[in-house]
Image (spheres, helix red, strand yellow):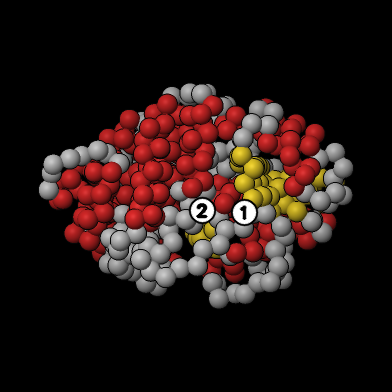
């Protein structure tokens, strides 16, 4: 196990009717930017709960943050925050809204172009607008981490940044608000955290029993509840376990002291930018082929996946590892999520995607830095 420092300052308020506690979490008389997406929070009752919980605050609404939050949209929110001297941003939605608000929070105390935050990792910041969240779509874990992914469609880019200043001060997780989510978002909400875990777990085997056990527990939970979630179950415990699993998939605890991969995500971001696929759809396509490409390096952990998540026994490591990939693909198929680009009628321009990816990244990808441009082309070709 590698040396590590772990710190996560996010206060989680979990359970039924927890939106009612907003007034206890936000100081009186503050100016709040209430940010959300397409407006579903007004039809599912979440908006009304928030307004009722904050009767003494000045609220500025900002709607329309897209899935894969769009930079040009977020610039408008940044301008509001600067003009109105907003005290706190309340992000209500899934990972896209929360990710977008992280950029808004940091850029509102930056005098340059906000895109610099994504393209220049050496920038230093001392202040951001405090951020709180009300999670309505479990998937990304953004409610309990300091990472963000932003799209800029005008230049075909999708880039990430992280900064400890944008850890949410609090995040409210009420499983009941997920009951009205459409099937596609439920599918994404199972696939995304599953791959978040594997990006931290299916790497080098360096004797990290606690992290591996935690990772396997999250994966087993997602497998257990995944099909029921996608089929629309409104059983409270099923929804609660799903929501908490998605949060724990990327709140940092699984990733301490271990080597991490994230190549699947980096390749997936380029597919989203180029072809408009949902983030989770790209992960389901890329991950199995990337594992096959990196089979020799990942065989030990793939075998652990097979035994400790999929319940395989009495087989040699390589056979278990091979079967683990197949069973994972079958799990995705059971959720009605495709694992090939051709299933979406996409003919990949693999070399173009790889060139764009490495225009944004100066080093090879993966936990062992073995995934270069040629490797990306091979992975994408096999994913066709």
Which picture quadrant has residue 262? bottom left
From the top left corner, tell me how far across and down residue 283 is, in percent.
38, 47
Tell which circle, 2 or 1, labels the residue nearer the N-terminal end. 1
The residue that mark 2 highlights is 251
From the top left corner, tell me how far across and down residue 211 is, in percent.
39, 55
Q: Is residue 178 left or right of residue 321?
A: right
Tell me whether the residue at label 2 lies in contact with that at label 1, contact meaning CB atoms closer than 8 angstroms. yes
**Looking at this view, is 343 or 207 the one in front?**
207
Identify the residue at image location x=62%, y=75%. 124
Q: In the figure, 109 relative to 324: above or below?
A: below
Residue 185 seen from this side: no
The residue that mark 1 highlights is 10
Identify the residue at image location x=82%, y=59%. 85
From the top left corner, tell me how far across and down residue 304 is, in percent.
25, 49
Q: CA distance from mark 2 to mark 1?
A: 9 Å
Q: Is residue 339 left or right of residue 6?
A: left
Identify the residue at image location x=43%, y=55%. 254
From the top left corner, tell me how far across and down residue 217 is, in percent.
39, 43
**Looking at this view, is 96 or 27 the one in front?**
27
Q: Is residue 376 left or right of residue 58?
A: left
**Looking at this view, is 290 or 176 the one in front?**
176
Q: In the figure, 343 relative to 274: above or below?
A: above
Task: Indicate the secondary structure of the residue bearing disc 1.
Answer: loop
């Amino acid at each position: 196990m590698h040396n590590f420092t772990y710190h996560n300052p996010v206060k989680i308020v979990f359970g039924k009717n927890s939106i009612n506690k907003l007034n206890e979490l936000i100081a009186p008389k503050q100016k709040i930017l209430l940010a959300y997406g397409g407006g579903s929070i007004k039809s599912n009752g979440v908006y009304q709960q928030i307004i009722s919980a904050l009767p003494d605050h000045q609220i500025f609404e900002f709607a329309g943050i897209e899935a894969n939050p769009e930079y040009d949209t977020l610039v408008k929110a940044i301008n509001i925050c600067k003009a109105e001297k907003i005290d706190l941003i309340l992000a209500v939605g899934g990972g896209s809204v929360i990710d977008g608000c992280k950029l808004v929070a940091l850029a509102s105390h930056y005098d340059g172009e906000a895109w610099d935050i994504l393209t220049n990792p050496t920038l230093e910041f001392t202040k951001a607008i405090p951020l709180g969240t009300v999670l309505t779509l479990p998937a990304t874990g953004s409610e309990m981490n300091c990472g963000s992914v932003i799209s800029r469609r005008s230049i075909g880019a999708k880039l990430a940044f992280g900064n400890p200043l944008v850890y949410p001060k609090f995040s409210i997780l009420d499983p009941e608000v997920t009951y009205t989510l459409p099937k596609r978002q439920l599918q994404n909400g199972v696939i995304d955290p599953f791959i978040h875990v594997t990006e931290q777990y299916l790497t080098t085997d360096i004797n990290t029993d606690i992290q591996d056990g935690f990772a396997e527990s999250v994966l087993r939970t997602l497998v257990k509840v995944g099909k029921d979630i996608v089929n629309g179950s409104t059983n409270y415990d099923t929804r609660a376990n799903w929501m908490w699993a998605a949060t724990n998939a990327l709140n940092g605890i699984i990733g301490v002291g271990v080597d991490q991969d994230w190549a699947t995500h980096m390749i997936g971001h380029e597919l989203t930018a180029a072809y408009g696929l949902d983030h989770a759809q790209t992960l389901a396509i890329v991950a199995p082929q990337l594992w096959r490409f990196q089979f020799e390096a990942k065989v030990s952990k793939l075998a652990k996946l097979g035994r400790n998540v999929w319940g395989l026994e009495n087989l040699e490591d390589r056979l278990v590892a091979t079967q683990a990939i197949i069973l994972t693909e079958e799990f995705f198929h059971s959720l009605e999520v495709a694992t090939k680009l051709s299933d979406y009628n996409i003919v990949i321009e693999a070399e173009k995607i790889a060139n764009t990816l490495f225009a944004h990244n100066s080093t090879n990808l993966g936990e062992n830095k073995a995934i270069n441009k040629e490797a990306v082309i091979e992975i994408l070709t096999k994913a066709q």
